Image (tube, grey):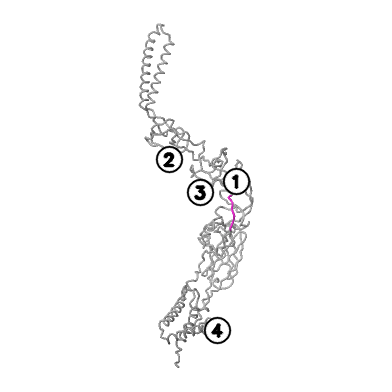
Amino acid sequence: MRVPNILPIFAITALLVAIPWTNSRAHEGEDHDESRPIPAVVSVTPRTEAASEKLELVAIADSGMLTIYVDRLRTNDPVTNAAITVETPVGSVFASPEHDGTYKLSAPWAVTRGHHDLIFTVESDATAEVLTATLEIPTAAPLAQSGSTGTNDGLLSQLRQRIEGRDPLLILSSIAGFVLGLVVMGLLARRKLVPTVALLAILAAVLTTAALAHEGEDHSAAAVHAAMPSDRDLAKRLPDGSLFVPKPTQRLLAIRTDVATSARHRRTIELPGRIIPDPNASGYVQASAGGRVSAPTGGFPRLGTRVNKGDVLAYVTPPLQAIDVSDMRQRQGELDQQISIVERRIARYETLAPRGAVTQVQLDESKLELQGLKDQRSALDRARVEPEALVAPVAGIVAEMNAIAGQMAQTNTILFQIIEPTRLWVEALSFDTLTGTQSAVAKTSGGRSLPLVYQGSGFADRNQAVPVDFKIEDDTSGLRAGQFVTVLAATTDEREGIAVPRASVIRSQAGHDLAFEHTSAERFEPRSVRIEPLDGERMLIVSGLKAGARIVTQGAELLDQVR
């Protein structure tokens, strides 16, 4: 009896044993050496902070120097004219002011790890504040070296651990390899080489794929050091959503705050409006009859040119048709004939009057008749050649000009619009009834606020709304007629809330309204708030923020960009 060759059995068993071991080694995104510790995040520069009722102080230790930032607690304004004395472990030291509004002092003791108690005496604006703080200098933990020995020792160690632990996958793979070896041996005994080669090729492909199916690893120590963050103080968003913003960054972004106070305010409604000229200080220039436009002496006035009431802006010469010319010539002939007859009559009366044949009254009446006929003849001549002068109805500036030399102007054509720029109104469309007791403010697209005085409201609806007129009481420089504004009119309803500047509220990417609360010297927390319009400069926070919190009033949009 022929003894079968058991070599294929052991070969296939070894292959199947290697597959689960390789899979355990070839997975994604893990360090192969479990004994290597994960590097911790490097903290910011050692710092401490303190606060009193009026001041807020941050001290940062770096390279044997202590940099001090002093701000006003309520507004976050830098205090640049203070005298600061610091009680340090080596004695009392005076902090010298720098040009950038900070204060610095030499602190060689700040390089020694441990806790250092400090006392700051800040003298500013004829007052003195004493603030205490503790500066902690931590110990930097070095990176531990890898505990792996050689590659072969590591492989043998893991294989030994799996065998000693009776890994089920390893045992099943051994049994499967033994059975598959028997199958291969039978195929070889029957000279069936093709199935045998196919089985061996499948095993080789599975082994190769399992061994190479991993990515995203970095086996070099340089990658570990590159992943460590820098020790610079950078503004960043913390995992809980709050912001860490160092004092130098706050100075750069000009962050300002204020303490929120709750009070009752009148509810405000927003109305669409536009700026219109005061009807008592503006006017149109139109021709009373159609004709050809011509410029006066010196040319047409330019846009923005100031004119006085009665100044000639243009001339309009009415055109004459052929039939009109014929009628005028006929009328001229009749007048010339009548004038000649009256002149001869007057000459005869003058000779008869001294002898008493004609009374003096008849002579005088004839002279008056002659003068009237001559006036009619002169007016008829002027009508043919004299144009109509278009004058300014009011004093102001030329806001609109549509006059061109040679243009044929109709009676409804507006050639000029004169506006007094210091007297402007605002016309708003309201869906609610407004009276003269409410205060109103107009807000331009650039954020400018214009106080308004109620003038009156219309009785007829315009697009299902009532037009309401307001007079602008503030300086009107930079405004123009037709400019769109938003009118904020107060109503009689009152609401409880916190009035904040409009710059304090921003819109998040999710569409929520946010306000930033200054919770500590270098920490800001976003708060979701519900707001209502209050006036041209402020918004009313009705929920989401408690009274007494320090809220950011300037620079909120810049804080929202911190990532």
Q: Spatial distance from mark 4 to mark 3, Cα to Cα? A: 76 Å
Magenta segment's dominant SS is: strand
Q: Spatial distance from mark 1 to mark 3, Cα to Cα? A: 20 Å
Q: Are marks 1 and 2 in contact (CB under 8 Å)?
A: no
Q: Position of residue 312 (x, y in %)?
A: 42, 33
Q: Amino acid at mark 4?
A: Arg
In the figure, 86 relative to 149: above or below?
A: above
Q: Amino acid at mark 1?
A: Ala
Residue 303 badge:
2
Magenta span contains residue 530: yes
Identify the residue position indicated by label 3 in the image. 445
Disc 4 secondary structure class:
loop
Task: Residue at 63%, 53% (x, y): give it.
Answer: 262
Q: Nearer the viewer, mark 1 or mark 2?
A: 1
Q: Residues within 10 Å of mark 4 (few under 14, many from 20)?
A: few
* Marks 1 and 4, the one that precedes in the sequence: 4
The boundaries of the magenta stretch are 528-533
Identify the residue position indicated by label 1 in the image. 490
Q: Spatial distance from mark 1 to mark 2, Cα to Cα? A: 37 Å
Q: Position of residue 79 (x, y in %)?
A: 56, 59
* Towards the viewer: 289 or 39: 289
Q: Position of residue 552 (x, y in %)?
A: 57, 57
Q: Spatial distance from mark 2 to mark 4, Cα to Cα? A: 97 Å
Q: Nearer the viewer, mark 4 or mark 3?
A: 4
* Marks 1 and 2, the one that precedes in the sequence: 2
* Marks 2 and 4, the one that precedes in the sequence: 4
Quadrant location, the N terminus: bottom left
Identify the residue position indicated by label 4 in the image. 166
